[in-house]
């Protein structure tokens, strides 16, 4: 028995319908956009829910400031609203997340136990996250004009 690595890769790692990250925004259909927005919003909502709960700790550089908690939970809510509505304003609300993270580092600094390499890595990740957020904003802007997905082929008979 031979393993079909190409089909396994397409099925579980990269699928143009389920994971269309390498498809240009102008070529996406609504199903592809829905799938990408769902994964994006799920990850954002989980991240900011966890950060919102963890931000009440007084050992962090902001010393448990309720403003940080409110911003984190607000970004969590914005991700859920973006998933539900696909509206560009909701997308713009979520896109500010890496900017808010960089503003946090500027205002409060990094955790004292983080090394210099980790600080640089965090800033690079925030920058890459911001670049990806521009893609999400483009998807939200173009979503109303996106075509419906092509009809699925019926499964071949047994």
Image (cartoon, grey):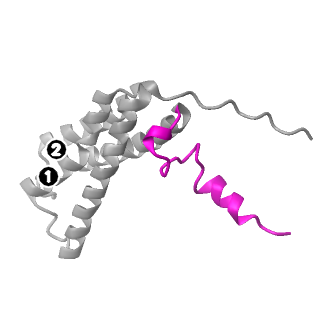
Residue at horizontal 90 percent and vertical 38 percent from the top: 157
Q: Are marks 2 and 1 in contact (CB under 8 Å)?
A: yes
Q: Quadrant of residue 114?
A: bottom left
Q: Secondary structure at mark 2?
A: helix
Give the alpha-carbon distance from disc 2 to disc 1, as whole Å: 8 Å
Q: Is residue 156 above or below residue 109?
A: above
**Foreground of the two, 66 or 148:** 148
Can the viewer see residue 38 in this picture? no
Q: Secondary structure at mark 1?
A: helix
Can the viewer see residue 128 in this picture? yes
Q: Position of residue 113 (x, y in %)?
A: 18, 71
Which stretch did the figure color magenta? 1-29
Q: Position of residue 158 (x, y in %)?
A: 92, 41
Q: In the image, is residue 93 part of the stretch drawn in magenta?
A: no
Q: Position of residue 110 (x, y in %)?
A: 15, 63
**Foreground of the two, 79 or 144:** 144
Residue at horizontal 68 percent and vertical 30 percent from the top: 151
Label drawn at residue 104: 1
**Foreground of the two, 64 or 96:** 96
Label drawn at residue 68: 2
Q: In the rendered view, does 89 fall on the left or right side of 30? A: left
């Amino acid at each position: 028995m031979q393993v079909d690595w190409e089909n396994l890769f397409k099925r579980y790692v990269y699928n143009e319908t389920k994971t269309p990250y390498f498809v240009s925004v102008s070529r996406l259909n609504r199903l592809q956009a829905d799938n990408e927005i769902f994964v994006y919003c799920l990850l954002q909502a989980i991240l900011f829910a966890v950060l919102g709960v963890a931000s009440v700790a007084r050992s962090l550089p902001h010393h448990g400031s309720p403003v940080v908690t409110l911003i984190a939970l607000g970004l969590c809510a914005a991700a859920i609203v973006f998933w539900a509505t696909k509206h560009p304003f909701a997308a713009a609300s979520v896109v500010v997340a890496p900017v808010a993270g960089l503003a946090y580092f500027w205002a409060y600094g990094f955790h004292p136990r983080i090394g210099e390499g980790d600080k640089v890595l965090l800033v690079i990740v925030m920058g890459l996250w911001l670049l990806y957020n521009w893609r999400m904003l483009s998807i939200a802007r173009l979503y109303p004009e996106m075509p419906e997905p092509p009809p699925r082929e019926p499964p071949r008979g047994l």
